[in-house]
Amino acid sequence: MLELTAVSLLNGVVYGLLLFMLTSGLTLIFSMMGVLNFAHASVFMLGAYFSFQFGRWIGFWPALVLAPLACGLIGAAIERYGLRHVHTKGHVAEILFTFGLAYLIEELVTMLWGRNAVASSVPESIDFPLFALFGTSFPAYKGLMMAISVTMFAFLFLALKRTRIGLIIQAALTHPQMAGALGHDVPGLFVLVFAVGSALAGLAGVIGGVMWLTQPTLAHFVGPIVFVVVVVGGLGSLSGALIASMFIGIVQTFAVAVDYSLLDLFRVLGIGVTRASPLYEFYAIKVATAAPIVPYLLLVLMLIVRPRGLLGTRDA
Amino acid sequence: MVRRARRMIWLALAGTLAAGPAAADVKIAFIDPLSGGAASTGILAQKTHQFYIDAINAAGGINGEKIQLLSFDNKVNPQESLIQLKKALDEGARFVVQGNGSSIALAITEAVQKHNERNPGKEVLFLNYAAVDPALTNEKCNFWHFRFDADADMKMAAMTDVIGKDPRIKAVYLINQDYSFGKAVAAAARKMLNEKRPDIKIVGDELHPLQKVQDFSPYVAKIKASGADTVITGNWSNDMVLLIKAGKDAGLKVGWQTYYGGSPGTVTAIGEAGVDTLKQVSEWHKNALPELDATVVAFDKRYPGKENEYAYWRARNMWEMFSLAAKKAQSNDPIKMGKALEGMKLQTALGDVEMRADNHQILQPLYVSTLSKGVKYDSEGSGLGWKSDAKVDGKATALPTTCKMERPA
Amino acid sequence: MKTGSALAAPPATFTAAQGNGAGRYRAWLATAVVLSVLPHVPGLNTDFGHSLLSQMGIAAVFALSFNVLLGQTGLLSFGHAVYFGLGGYAAIHFMRAINHGLPVPIALVPLAGAAAGLLFGILFGSVTTRRSGTIFALISLGVGELVYAATFMLPGYFGGEEGITANRTRAPELFGLNFGSQLQVYYVIASWALVAAMLMHAFIRTPLGRMCNAIRDNPERAEFIGYNTQHVRFFAFAVAGLFAGLAGGLHAINYEIVAADSVSALRSGTVLLMAYIGGVTHFAGPVVGAITLTWLQISLSDYTAAWLLYLGLFFMAIILFAPSGLAGLIVMHAAVVRTKAFRRLLAAYAIALVPAAVMGTGAVLLIEMSYRLSTHPELGAKMRLLWIAMDTATPWPWIVAVVLLVAGFVAFRMTWRRVAAAWDRAGDEARGGRFGGGDGSAR
């Protein structure tokens, strides 16, 4: 029991940190520009593909640096040449633009790399067990991912709180018009934030591509969850994104291990429920089967009860 | 005026729409996943079928007509499959080939039955090369469906025979995909282990979502915690590869008893850790015969690359029987060919093969094999390859059936 | 801006009282006639054609229901497929009950779908419509994913991966029709589609429909005059759910199977594309979008593996350059078709068409060659596009493609200015002025 708990906790933390890497960028983008960026998960996927391709040409470690850079450039281009023209047409057009972009990126990836998952493999330098927890080994690449994620959080946090540009970005996160009125180049900031956010997604993609399979449908796996984290964590708050990612990562990982259902609860409480009872099928749902629903339930509840999220600084 | 525009659009479209199928070719529809999580197996299967069809066409086709393979992507989704099936039938296909996903096969066999009832004279045959839910040749059987792979129960019988003889196996964990096939594997495992080795404890019975899980480490943690020494799984395609990968990463030391351990990418994922632990039940493997079959060599030459390694021997049987049936029936009409296929016997390099007339289930030799070092032909360039543990003759794989099918006149 | 002037007229079909009663009835009658004749038109009188028309009909109803939310009430929903799918499930269970002896004709099955759509529209709508704008979009996304995940949790009702099937021929016959043939199914679908379209069109003209437009245009003001925007959104949501469920019921009849992907995010995305491409500001826009997209999905996929990419590019082009969709484009042109300047406009189009075609050819070449290399590398480097054979291993086809693309783009930008100028002239003339004065005002 203790073994399962400890291992599940560790796995949950790993998953949570990966989610955080992915969503930190989106939190910044969404908070600052109010744009529901559907293409964020697609940039994550691009990061995975770039790291595969660059890794093939020049090796994993240079790719770890170059792939996020490439994604950052792409993010800047999206904002500067695409979204900027759509800003004036209203929120609906913006959302639809990123929505169409997600479609496009998936197809472009298929066009360049095919429909099959690409043969990305864990690079040898990090393909060894780091340590063993209760007999289950913990691979080094997961450790690398955790290290990168934590470093990144620290770096972002410091950049936002301690640098001048961070200060301006914080202001623009909660009061964009005012920041603009004070003479700061808010559109330029938008490009910067979009670029940094996309670079972060690309970085997450490098690790995600190693952990998971790099295939054109990769974006579908993380897409919806990312929005859940951003909304639940709260707009304008990186710490909120961290807390929400960890929460969702841990809950989802633990849930798989729980095979109990309401039936078991009834049995303990002595309530007799048989197969003929009308809602039997509902009671028989195991927690493990119900796990996928939890994040979305949380999303809907949060949006109704507290739209600014857990630690948000302003309403969506 | 918008309505006028709308009408204009309708008429313009009508003018540009393709009228109907071209004559003379026999159109065969291939409806399998060509994108998404199961793309690797679907695309490989498509190439295999095309390869054999090209060979048939090069030898003159069937009854003088060439075969044209039309491919449709079903995305492992029964609704999408029926949409594509409709499209295929509308384009004139008279044969449907499908295999990846019993959920799909169940939908297709029912849809084909309905179509044939409603369109006498335009009947269609369903050639199932890989969907092994036993129901398809038992309670859901019909005349139009022919299965060219051993069903899940038959494979489990072979697997449990070998397990039964291994005294080291004491605790078994079942993990399968949450749909008809996965559930069938779990049920068969329970039943047959109970019959052959009642002392073996089943310490876990897990069903996970189909083609949706990217990270199996939580499941691996559960397997570890249960204390199992053997895992039985029917997982295929990405689900197999990712499960194995997570197991290897976590250093899980169990014996893997699989149906589809030969899924592209699995051997690479497990590597050395799979030697003597990864087993599979299949109708063929590279070292089943002392020499590689000529078609296998030709296929791997035409499609080089790890992801294109030949894997579908059942396709070879299927197309051989198909062209024989056309010859026997002297016609490409599906009903006549169906009747010719029933009861057909074939002698192959691996042994005798027979298509049962009572439930349209093929009887073919089955191999239980283990991943080993030092074999003649390795898989996926890993230096490791499959070695036979046991072989079951075609006839011995037969199981009783509950099929009662109505035959056309 | 000059080019925008022709678009300044407000969308005519939604808010204004349109024409006289007799004109409207004539239009609907004409539509009914066209719908009955369509499956017998040569080219469409095959099984393939009947299937195509049936699918277009289902998609049209679905897209129209979506537009009740987006075009009429300004609510962008990413989870509309939920009501379509749940309606479909209800309908297929109803059909199963009919298979087991319930004496109801198949033609009434869509009512079950509509009822379920309404029920769930009310149920989820009470929660979803508390907010509007981006939050509403997010909630709808959450509800959509929630319901999709839930369908796998209750396999008894939703059938798990296999879905639920039924048989449309095992039912009491209506006028001797057993609905086995696709043609009969088409007529059922077409009839229901016509009824649904008429009802939704009528809805626009009800006080509730007008209030939906009001809260779309200016929610604050609507509140000032005493209407609770949340209640209006809720009613609109319920109505949209009802018609989406109806479409789901039609789907159940057509395919005789309903599975989890009826409630998936992909289907929600598809209907969004349909409605937007067709044009959300016009009543018939979603129908145009549904027809176009269905045709693309079914026919274009036969010709090229890259059809989804073309669809994506098409969608982006609509967002960037024609936000009122295809229907908007048609109406825009209809407004100027009678002017003398129209001929100059056509001439300008013809001139701009050449570089556009060049650019398009270059792009298509690049895309098709890349797709061929990545998805079918084993087929070798030599391929043929239409009637041109090329060897993708050599640099020449690539260079040619890039040159065509770039040159076409540059030339297109130059000729497009002519088109813009011609539009200004045509627009001015349509509004009653002569060749628009220097300041552009034609009042």
Image (spheres, coloured by chain):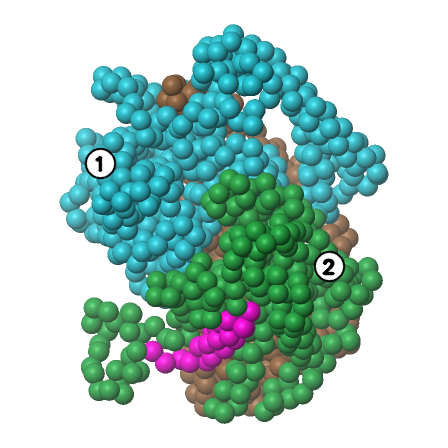
Chain colours: A green, B brown, C cyan
Quadrant housing the C terminus of chain A: bottom left
Give the residues drawn in magenta, as a range: A238-261
Residue B305 lies, in percent from the top left, at 75, 57
Image height check: is A32 above or below B118?
Answer: below
Amino acid tagged 2? Leu
Residue C77, position as x, y percentages in the image: 40, 49
Q: Are marks 1 and 2 on the same chain?
A: no
- What x and y, as percent, mark residue C437? 55, 13
Above or below, A24 against C222 in this view is: below
Residue A262 percent location from the top left of the image:
30, 78
Which element type, helix, strand or loop, lies under badge 2?
helix
Q: Chain of mark 2?
A: A
As rendered, which of C151 and C46 lies closer to the eye? C151
The residue furthest left is C103
Marker count (numbered): 2
Residue A69 marker: 2
Query: Which of the 4 quarters of the picture holds residue A304?
Result: bottom left
Q: Are marks 1 and 2 in contact (CB under 8 Å)?
A: no
Query: Crowdedness of circle 1 by 10 Å Cα count: few (<14), some, many (20+)?
Result: few
Instruction: Look at the magenta stretch and give its main secondary structure.
Output: helix
Taking the spot 66% from the left edge, 36% from the top edge, the residue there is B60
Q: Residues within 10 Å of mark 2 (few under 14, many from 20)?
A: many
Chain name for mark 1:
C
Q: Quadrant of residue C192?
A: top left
Q: Is residue A123 visible?
A: yes
Give amino acid for label 1: Pro
Q: Secondary structure at mark 1?
A: helix
Q: In this rendering, would A313 be left or right of A106?
A: left
Q: Residue furthest front?
A: A182
Give the image quarter of residue A306.
Answer: bottom left
- Location of mark 1 (residue): C207
